[in-house]
Amino acid sequence: MTKTDSTGSTWRYRWARRQNERRQRSFRAADEAWRRRDEELRRLRTLAGSFHGTADAGAGLPMELSPGEVVFWTLPAAQLVEVRHTAVLPAPDLIVDPDPPAVRPRRPDGVKVTDAGLAVLTNRRLVLLGGRGRRDWAYGRMTGLSHDPGAPVTLIQVLDRRRTSGLLLPTGAVGDFRFKLTLAFADAIEQRAAVIAQLDELIEEHTAARPVRPAIRTPAQARLSARVPGGRRTIAAGAALALIVPAMLFESDPPVRPGSEIASAATPAATTPPAAPPLAPVVRIDQTTAPKAHRSRTGPADPPSRQAPPQPAGERRCGAPVNPYGYDFCGGSRIRRPADGVCDWFDCVPGFWSGRGWLVQCRDGTVSLTGGQRDSCAGHRGFRRTVWT
């Protein structure tokens, strides 16, 4: 007779109830995170399409606008910073990051604050109206742009100024400022359509990755292992111990003392010829798991290749080749800085390291660092899918 509890339900019904509650909690958490990201992506897409300024917005500002110049955005309490040791910054790009890293209200080492005032963003330049004067960064003369991933600092290099400078902003305004600066720069070089196309692609990928409500577990699906605390893991651990302990006992025989009967019986006769030396083991190379030859690359100096053991065969990859970095086609986070040895496991396009974007696979099977670009996988039959980690 089946054993029941005080409510009359059997262990199978209790198992099904616990499974359904756990799966529903996981689904609700994933769905809530998906909805927050979806709302943010669509907000950025709307802002990119309606990002327009007016000349009237500059009224009352202690600066004179050039003919055709309009004000997009203003922010008080911005600080002017300068770098003590000049470094070459990466060139400005149009990459949109909908998930900016969490920054702390700190000033990085080597950066000093020299002024404070009102930051003004126009369709031609970024201006700081400070107490010591005005500082301009014209988009047409901008050669380098870098956003600090851990601090609310943006550094800019321009042709008409030797020292690198930039802005230190309140942490709550960092994400909005960086996105609007990207839009203003794209508008100045007539590439706003590329930013909008990038956001449309992000929304399409995010829509396809929406969590699916899990199926309902029924009591008939319960296995007998569910009655053991810990389930199949406990059974597997017990089976492993049952195999390991006898092996350890077998290899832990007590030492044989010289002169004993066992030692005498174990001593070979004097007429017994010596045994032949053991042969060297033969090492076989598995061609299926050996890494591909390092693909020649053109462009900037490539980082050295690093060999690493492949992933276990059971890892999910959704069609991606075996690799030690966990890269797959299933989903996750975009790869903007791939591992040095990525081309030992994936088929990289020529000039792979000169790409400016995230890691994608082209329709001819090669991988490229051109994700988010309008000409992604140009010359390789176009974009196919994103590589995730």
Image: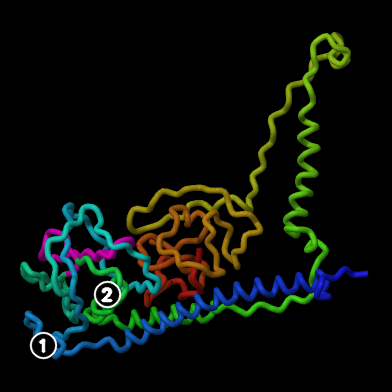
Horizontally, residue 48 falls left or right of residue 334, namely left
Mark closest to the chain's N terminus, 2 or 1: 1
User: Residue at horizontal 82%, vertical 74%?
Assistant: 9
- Residue bounds of the magenta highlight: 142-166
For residue 59, the mark is: 1
Amino acid type, label 2: Phe
Horizontally, residue 44 falls left or right of residue 10, namely left
Based on the displayed image, in which of its 4 quarters is residue 224 positioned?
bottom right
User: Residue at horizontal 19%, vertical 79%?
Assistant: 74
Q: Where does residue 25 sit, x and y in percent of width and height?
A: 61, 74
Residue toward you, 84 or 36: 36
Q: Where does residue 46 sit, x and y in percent of width and height?
A: 36, 87
User: Residue at horizontal 35%, vertical 62%?
Assistant: 354
Tell me if residue 299 is in the magenta stretch. Answer: no
Horizontally, residue 6 falls left or right of residue 200, namely right
C-alpha span from label 2 to label 1: 21 Å
- Residue 147 vertical placement versus 120 (above, below): above
